[in-house]
Image (cartoon, rainbow, N blue to C red):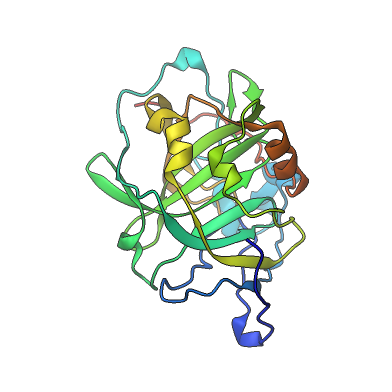
Amino acid sequence: MAPTFKILSAAAIITLAAACAKHDNHQSNFQKRQVLTPGGRDEKDWAYPESYDWGSINSNYSLCQMGTQQAPIPLALDQGLSQRHRPDFVGFPSNVTGNFYNWGYGPAYTIAHEDGRFNTLPSMTFDNKTVYLRGWHIHAPADHTVGGVRSRAELHYVMVDSAGHEAAVLALRLDPGQTPSPFFSELPKPLLGFNETDQIMNQTLNPRLPLEAVDFFSEFWTYQGSLTSPPCTEGIRWFLARTILFISHEQMQALLLVSQFSARAEQQVWLHQINA
């Protein structure tokens, strides 16, 4: 939906992090106007094509170089699929409100919530732990390969704990197919480009649609990993759906048009405990 007007005051500017979308540009549920807001993004000192050497750029990124559970890693069908850590999506509603933006590499969305109240967000459980959907963003091409094959893009649902710390990521590979994706049909048109810093606020969508398309992660790989951008924080439970989420050729073209290369170099498997 087209925005109604622009907020031009400095107080309205919301700064977006240039790292893998941090989804901290939320807006209170009590603000209901649909507006387009100047966003702005911090300057970054790293880039995806040089991801092998992030640890040499900044001492704060040392984990990117020496971590034992860095993501992404290559996966394969002959590794089998997980029989443990199965996610349960009973706390996922079919309607949320939030802000669309481009995180500098592709489309992204943050769900509206009150400051500090993450337990009001859509929730899933695994291993008797509850985590909350703070937002999603897209990488192009996909971060993960399966059997050496890389999809054209990858959708990441970023899950946080009750304190707002990243705790898990639901990853869905995206490839072109014959039928439009209902989820991608809900995204604003045209999509915001990678060089645009505006946000489209108070937009609703159904976060269950991608989950339905992959049978709610009935088959998946899982491992202990990290964020895929500096500072490469570890302790993140990764879930990668075996089923690919197919979108139409036109939807894929529109997605790639507003994206920049954002696939981190695959990391060597170490202490990742794949499917364990």
Residue depicted at 40% across the width and 20% down the height = 81
**Outermost left residue:** 128
Decide which of 253, 276 is in the foreground and name it.
253
Q: Is residue 156 left or right of residue 13?
A: left
Image position, residue 42 (x, y; %):
67, 68
Q: Can residue 71 be seen in the rendering of this structure?
A: no
Above or below 17: residue 169: above
Q: Is residue 205 above or below residue 40?
A: above
Look at 53% across and 68% down and name the residue there: 25
Residue at 73% across, 47% down = 259
As drawn, is 19 to the left or to the right of 203?
right
Question: Where in the figure is residue 69, as x and y percent of width and height?
Answer: 47, 39
Instruction: In this rendered view, identify the residue nearer to me: 37 or 156.
Output: 37
Quadrant position of the N terminus in the picture: bottom right
Query: Residue farthest to the top?
Result: 78
Q: Is residue 108 visible?
A: yes
Figure quadrant of the C terminus: top left
Residue appearing at x 49%, y 15% in the figure? 77
| Residue 194 pos. (x, y %) | 74, 55
Question: How far across and how far down the image is residue 37, in percent?
Answer: 64, 74
- In this rendering, the count of numbered labels is 0
